[in-house]
Amino acid sequence: MLTVHHLGKSQSERIVWLCEELGVPYDLKLYQRAPVMAPPDYKALHPMGNAPVINDGDVTLAESGAVVDYILAKYGDGRLVLTKDHPDFAQYLYWLHFANGTVQPALMRVLISNRIKPDGDHPAIAIGKQRLELCFSLLDQRLAKATWLAGDDFTAADIMTVWCLTTMRYYQPVDLAPYPNIRAYLKRIGARDAYRRAMTKGDPGMELLLA
């Protein structure tokens, strides 16, 4: 059976959610942060020590994008993906990779800048904030004309992205007031039974930052 190792308040929530959306049987193992980073038993799962990590038979795999692709290819039966013949295929690919390729690095740059707090008004800080605002503005513009990121269909692109808009805000707060379409989108996410189940199983008692 597929084993999902979920570190609390981490990107591995994507994998729990994906399994719930697909109805894939899985064994969920929960780990608490110690106090901020992964505990030693989680770090021992993979050389990088990052979440997520899965086991599937003899396979041990990390990196949320790789894990999502693996589960979709092996267990998805064509669900939550768009094929090359779909008119929104390019949109699906773009938004599938946008979260980890663009939004997450922008969030991390701002988070690190806020923690370091260098003397003076370093231009890199302003550039980082502008980049992050651009990311959220682009998402908001996309969601002004599409129900889901790839278009009319809920896909893995949404599963990859929502972490950046919700749980990541525990580490780097973002005011969503200027982004009404993101806020409306998160209401739609919160109405999905699979999302609610995944978050209850993976992070019981955690407030969901859906607004």
Image: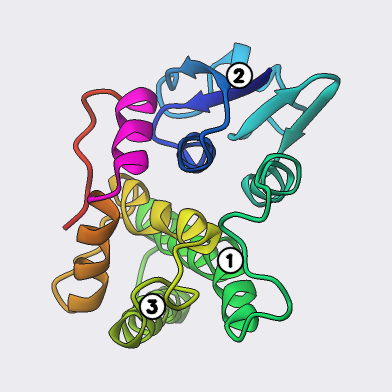
Report if the CB atoms under discs 2 and 1 are less than 8 Å apart: no
Q: Which mark is residue 96?
A: 1
Residue density around tag 3, few if under 14, some if 14–19, many if 20 or more, within 10 Å: many
Q: Is 189 left or right of 124, judged from the image as shown?
A: left
Q: Is residue 124 magenta?
A: no
Q: Secondary structure at mark 3?
A: helix
Amino acid type indicated by mark 3: Leu
Residue plotted at (33% across, 27% down) = 203
- Which sits in the foreground, 35 or 83? 83
**Residue 14 in view (yes/no):** yes
Over which residues does the magenta segment extend?
191-203
Q: Tell me: residue 97, above or below residue 117.
A: below
- Mark 3 or 2, closer to the camera: 3
Q: Tell me: residue 139, above or below residue 11.
A: below
Q: Quadrant of the N terminus?
A: top right
In this picture the colour scheme is rainbow
Residue identifier under label 3: 139
Residue plotted at (29% across, 45% down) = 170
Amino acid type indicated by mark 1: Leu
Residue plotted at (51% across, 26% down) = 6
- Which sits in the foreground, 190 or 110? 190
Report if the CB atoms under discs 1 and 3 are less than 8 Å apart: no
Q: Give the Cα distance between marks 3 and 2.
A: 33 Å
Q: Give the Cα distance between marks 2 and 1.
A: 26 Å
The outermost residue toward the top is: 41
Quadrant of the image occupied by residue 94: bottom right
